[in-house]
Image (cartoon, helix red, strand yellow):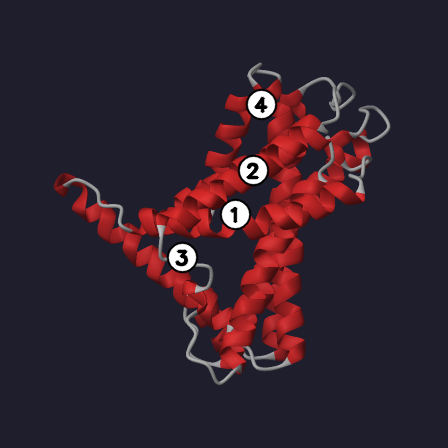
Amino acid sequence: MFENLNEKNYLQLILFGLVLLLSSVLLMSLGYVIGIFIWDGADVTLALEGTFENDNQINILKMFQVLNQLSMFIIPPFVLYFLLREKIENYLGLSISPNINTFIALVFLYIFSIPFIQWSMEINQHMSLPEALSGVESWMKEKEDIGALITEKFLNVSTLSGFLLNIIMMAVLPAIGEELLFRGLLMRWFSKAISNIHINIIITAFLFSAIHMQFFGFLPRFILGIILGYSYYWTKSIWAPIWLHFINNATTVTVYYWAFNSNSNVNPEEVGNVAGLEYVLLSVIIVAAILRWMYKNRIEN
C-alpha cells in the first residue's frame, strides 16, 4: 500500500493518521494504568475530567500532557521520517543544521520581538464578537480561563526538578513536535497544492495558532507561526524554528518559575509589556532588520 509513499501526500497523511491513532490509544491506555498504579484511580478519573484540586491530579494531567505530545506530534512525524529519509532529500528539514550566526540571530529575533508580540496579545485580548455571537464569545472566554488556570497550575512549581520537568514538557517537546508537524510536514504537504510560499506559511501559521484553542491569544501565536515558517523556509532546517520555539516557551517557563519563587509581586503575564507605541515600532523595525538578514543569507532551493 505504501510503495509510493514518497510520491503521494495522501498516503503519508493516511499513515500519519494511523500512527497517531495507534500511538494515542496505546499511550493513553499506558498512562491510565500508570496513573492508577502510582496515584489513585479516582484521581486519574477526575484529572481526565478536568479536575485539578490537588497535586496528584496536576501531576496526572502533566503525565497525560507529555503522552499526548508524544502520540500527536513526536511519534507520527518520526515514523514518516524513518520511512522516507533515504528517499526524500532533507526530509522534514532534519539533515541541515543552521550555522551559529543563525542561532544567535534567532535569539535576538525573539528578544526584540517581545514588545510587538505583547502588544499584539493586548490587542487580541480586547477582541469582541458581535452581539449575535455573544454565546460563542462566552464559550471562548470559558475555555480560555480553564486553559489559563491549568497552565498556571503547571507552571507554579517551587522545586528545580519541577522546573526542569516543565522545561521538557512545555518547551522541549512542543518545540520539536509542533515544528515537525506544522513546518516539517504541513508546509511540505501544502507546497504540492499551494505554489505561493507566503500563502503556505500564513495558512500553516493559522492552523498552528488555531490548534492551541486559545482564542484570545490567537494573534500573537499566529505572528509567531509566520516567523517560524519563514525561519524554516529560509534556512531549509527544522532546527531553526525548533530553536526559536524552544526559546519562546522556555522563557515563559523560566519567568513563571522565577516569579513564583521570588519575593517580588511581578505578574509573569506582564513581563515584556511596554508603555509606549514607540517601543513597539522599534521592536518591529529591529525584527524586520533581523528577518531581512536571514532572507539575504537564505539557502536557495
- Give how far apart the Cα atoms at labels 3 and 2 are: 21 Å
- Give how far apart the Cα atoms at labels 3 and 4 are: 37 Å
- Give how far apart the Cα atoms at labels 4 and 2 are: 17 Å
Q: Amino acid at mark 4?
A: Phe
Classify the position of the N terminus by image quarter.
Answer: top right
Which residue sits furthest bottom?
A: 263
Q: Disc 1 designates what residue?
A: 113
Which residue sits furthest right?
A: 86
The residue located at (44%, 45%) in the rendering is 220
- Pointer 3: residues within 10 angstroms few (<14), some, or many (20+)? some
Classify the position of the C terminus by image quarter.
Answer: top right
N-term-proximal mark, 3 vs 2:
2
**Left or right, residue 88 beside residue 260:** right
The residue located at (55%, 74%) in the rendering is 257
N-term-proximal mark, 1 vs 2:
1
- Give how far apart the Cα atoms at labels 3 and 1 are: 12 Å
- Pointer 2: residues within 10 angstroms few (<14), some, or many (20+)? many
The residue located at (59%, 39%) in the rendering is 228
Which residue sits furthest left?
A: 131
Q: Amino acid at mark 2?
A: Ile
Secondary structure beneath dot 3 equals loop
**Left or right, residue 207 beside residue 254:** left
Q: Amino acid at mark 1?
A: Ser
Q: Disc 4 designates what residue?
A: 190
Mark seen at residue 84: none
Mark 1–mark 4 contact, CB under 8 Å? no
N-term-proximal mark, 1 vs 4:
1
Q: Disc 2 designates what residue?
A: 227
Asked whether 134 or 37 is in front, the reply is 134
Mark 1–mark 2 contact, CB under 8 Å? yes
Front of the two marks 3 and 1: 3
